[in-house]
Amino acid sequence: MTVHRVEVRPSDTAGDPKGAAVCATATAASLAATPERVDTSAVYLLEGELSTDELQQLAADLLADPVAEHVTIGAAEPRGCQLIEVHPQPGVMDPEAEAVEAAIEALIGRPISVRTGRRFDLHGINAQDANTLALRCLSNPLIHEIHDAPHHPDAFEHGHTRDVQVRDIPLCDLDDDALQKLSREAHLFLSLEEMRKVQAHYRTLGREPREIELETLAQTWSEHCVHKTLKATIDYHGTLPQSIPNIEPGESGALRIDNLLKRTVAAATHTLMAEDLGDWCLSVFVDNAGIVAFDDDTAVCFKVETHNHPSALEPYGGAATGIGGCIRDVLGTGLAARPIAATDVFCVAPLGITNVPDGCLHPRRILNQVVAGVRDYGNRMGIPTLNGGVWFDAGHVGNPLVFCGCVGVMPRDRTHGDPQAGDRIIAMGGRTGRDGIHGATFSSAELTDTHADEFSHAVQIGNAITEKKVLDAILEMRDHESGCLFSAITDCGAGGFSSAVGEMGEHLGATVQLERAPLKYVGLTPVEIWISEAQERMVMSVPAEKVDTIAAICADHEVEWCDLGEFGTEGAELILNQGDVEVGRLQMDFMHNGLPDLVREARWSEPTIDQPAATNEVDLGNTLKALLSHPNIAAKSSIIRQYDHEVQGRTVLKPHAGVNAGPADAAVVTPVRGSTRGLAIANGLATGLCSDPYHMVTAAVDECVRNLVCVGADPTRIAILDNYCWPGCDDPDQLGALVRASAGCHDAGIAYRTPFISGKDSLNNQFTTESGETIRIPATLLISGFGIVDDIRTCVTMDAKHATHALVLAGDTTDRVGGSHLLQVAADAPGNRALPETNLTTGPRTAHAVANAIAQGKVYAAHDASEGGVLLAAAEMAFSGGIGLALDMAAVRGELESTTVACFAETPSRYLLEVCPNGLDALAEAMGDVPHRVIGTFDDSNRVHGDGIDVTLDDLHLAWATGLGL
Amino acid sequence: MDFMARPKALVLTAPGINCDAELCEAFDLAGAEPMPVHINRLARNQHWMDEASLIGLPGGFSYGDAIAAGRICAALIRTQIIDGLHQAVARGVPMIAPCNGFQIAVQTGLLPNIEGRDARVALLHNDSGRFVDRWVKVNYPESRCVWTRGLDVPAGAHVLPIAHGEGRFMCDSDDTMAALDAAGQIAVRYAADDDPNGSQGLVAGICDHTGMVLGLMPHPERYLHWTSHPTWTVMGDLSGQTPVGLAMFSNAVQHVCAAEQCTA
């Protein structure tokens, strides 16, 4: 068949902002040479029989705009001195091509294959520099082809069909070495103990495992799916600030913790539920997201995931499929929730670094692309991304962290699914391809895995519109007039069909016809179909009589679906067929309960603290500006503004607050249209304290609670999530740090009465350079939280509102500055280098007192003092509201010896409140015995001033607004 | 009081359209009965357009905005339901098309629809090359648009939210721009000091020559409640006033009710 080529470029009068953006990106990337000008064109390759008239009509009516674009059939003459074309590699998801294919079929009535590409005509640059530009700014060789001439292939590559083969993997007679070799070479990633367990099982059965069975076990038993480290038995040698209930020292003196997650994070939740939160927590830890009650009729759920390794290699696709997967988790919670908000937190290396190890992308590129991925996916899904943060640390050069969160809302009678024997297994959404098995790419000449790429599973591109269509269809099925059309639903994430069907059919068994899955291209083996992690797929359990209705809804929404088989087999077996051939048979019980229990050693020794020999008080104004422009603290507006944070029309408090758009503490949305009941969403992250993960975690919980309380959330109705990202857990020290962190989760969860409802872990984030150096991320634990706001009209923002009002500091400051941003900008600043500790008695009490004062309407603005300390938070309030501030430095200092410490220490559990002067007595009543004092007065000076400081609001705002440099 | 049926507001959805729920809420709060309908179902049930008193083309990323924003949706509308939409316009049905809806409307010929001219306009990539979400200052020139009548009256009317990557307005010729201006078809402009995308003539929204069809890049359907305003916590108690987004929809619903002599 013929391949036609069509090029579309902006007319001269229309201008080419995309071309200008390429120049700007090249400049920001500090390339040796940058082009003077770039002209961009869209390239469409159409394979199929098209008459000249049809081609011209498609070009004119569909591919080009008559007002603003030029169209060329074939390739236009070069316009610059170099030409670069970037095309997705064959087999890589090309969402635009899929949409164009569907549109052409609708318009001309027959299918045409489409591929897209981008053409760049570069002016004022030589060939070598153009190639560098292509590699650094325009493409990623893992997923793209780069051409230096117009690409016009004679034909597209297509797959080839293959005969079904059922392979036995001889295992029963292997010794330990051979078992380990098999695990490694077959990419099973199973330990020797696990391989032995599998061997013993098959010896009992008296046969060898088939390939698909072994792959299924490897998926089901993977760290990603069962969290075996966090659930392992751990012998912990070290101290804990508080004892963990029901854990005693064993004979060796070590604490034996059987199932760390259950004993700490989950135990906190179950303790709180047994006390008084049992009616509020509707589903914890068991589903794709945790669910709590919102009002009498409605529930809300929250899930946060990481997508770290994919984002290191292909940041755009990695982040997009990260948010896409998290949205699917919410859609696959209970009987489907409607996603109403998204969050994102990124941890990357500093943008200014020049020395990036081979095999790593520059952090600027990673951050830009990660933001673009979340933007393009979240915006297309119509889900507002409205809270997050960015943390910079050199340890992230090889392992950026990408946390994506999603909040959903559902009727309370749709919070639990229950698959039934006899239900059909319905899969819907994206087609199944080799994504996540042997890479998103495949060689056209040979569809077998000839160049196994160890990173392959990571590289995927998402198609948001496929997922949006699935979302629309599923919600229609959930809310169908005849009742919910499915009895259970889950998403296809890690492990693909094997995990989704395996989990839903755990107690029922299932018979699966793999040949029924719609494929992206021919030639997939049954194993590949079964374990593919192709995006945008959901699996439902559907009563047979409802399948026709499901089919009609799918047709209207242009959603592909298939009937993969049936739940329910004798003895709860999983039976996998390809046509008439049985390719695998497994006992669900062995899959889900066969994993051997491990005992692992963990140890913790207190970090040593080096106190400085000599210290100096800092210049308050300059230090304040330096901290405001610290990238962790500086404005994230250049990121936030790229996200649609208002789609759905529910957003009450946005990421920015005040007339000068300052940094809001938390976002607030209205899950129920027409109701004034709100939901506040925030994060807590205290990686600066990672030298003791216990204090890091308690501070993060405290910060998350503070953020929520500051906007008006009810502290008795806050639920939180834990996301661990650890450098590794192979050595006892790192595992010991993990135990400390988990103990922190337990103690803070109980103290703040904030149940954990969901969590996730990513426990291998270290990078080995070519020279053998290991670069580790700092131990990181993100706390995400949401809390109920009784009436959004009482919400408070952080920007100062009125001159003459008093600024009140609630909570005490200690002399500890370990891990603070102050030490990053002034290493010889005064202060005790020990880490600040969260007081788990006064911290919650302060949160409740502040919430009480806000609820009584005493507070005009509230802001938490965290990174950068009290002076920084006060300055943010002032410039965000455009209101000057006179500080009483003696009051700021209080009992402390050092003004520097008083201004910039990052002691947890402190709040800044704007209060009307004649409301101070009422405030005192609301605060009870919680320490608080007036530290300043807002005024008309347009400055932040006091003894030792005098800076204009404009200077402060400028430092904050430009600090990120993105 | 005579309670007659609320006028029906047809809200079109399509793959990737994602501002339909708030558009329905807007019609509902303004006194109309929103009827969301998927374009594929509408194509099979064209009479639904005949029964509509108002029509909304919502924002979003129809078909992923593949090729260009709104391009594929516009192509499908042109081949499937454009006659019904033209008939509705001829009947005097008010139609609103925010953001992606605007991009679709200019590519289906529903806009600019200048009397006696075969003119075209386009909405191109923002001059920044980036998607942007923020509230922008706007004003409402004297125009024949039914949706924007009297909008300088409500407090807080000077801002509306935008969220788009392809909103740069461009006419096929200077004559078209002059004709739009002369005919009173420029309904919304960005303030000169707050242009978010480099639009020709600072145009943020236009209407057709009947004044019934409004296309605009800002999202009035995201400004139905005072608590949506970016600085509502600074502004004091505004609960007694109508947010300008809602006022637009009330204008259209009242126009329909006056014409149909029903009560909203």
Image (cartoon, coloured by chain):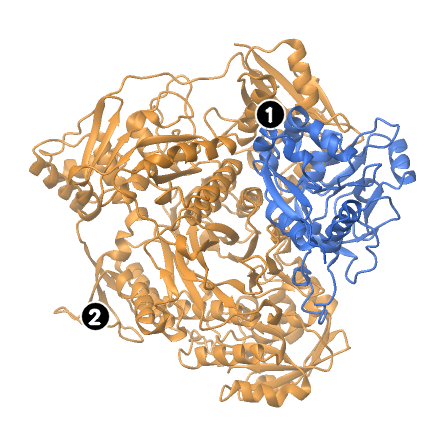
Chain colours: A orange, B blue
The residue at the point 25 percent across, 56 percent down is A231
Residue annotated with mark 1? A85
- In the image, is residue A833 above or below residue A386? below
Instruction: Please name the amino acid that badge 2 sits on.
Output: Ile
Corner quadrant of residue A957: bottom right
User: Could you say where residue A514 lies in the image, as x and y percent from the top left?
Assistant: 30, 28
Q: Nearer the viewer, residue A589 or A458?
A: A589
Count of numbered circles in the view: 2
Q: Evaluate whether label 1 is on the same chain as label 2.
A: yes
Distance from label 1 to label 2 (Cα)?
Answer: 62 Å
Name the residue at the front extreme. B2
Residue at position x 83%, y 38% in the image: B210
Q: Position of residue A583 (x, y in %)?
A: 22, 27
Q: Quadrant of residue B120?
A: top right
Quadrant in which residue B199 is drawn: top right
**Which residue carries the number 2 mark?**
A247
The reply, left or right, for residue A838 in relation to residue B167 is: left
Q: How far across and down, in percent of the image, does residue A525 sit?
A: 31, 24
Q: Is residue A573 above or below residue A326?
A: above
The location of residue A252, given as percent across then percent down, is 14, 68
Chain under numbered label 2: A
Point 32% across, 31% down: residue? A564
In the visual, does A177 lie left or right of A80? left
- Of residues A919 and A247, the one nearer the viewer is A919
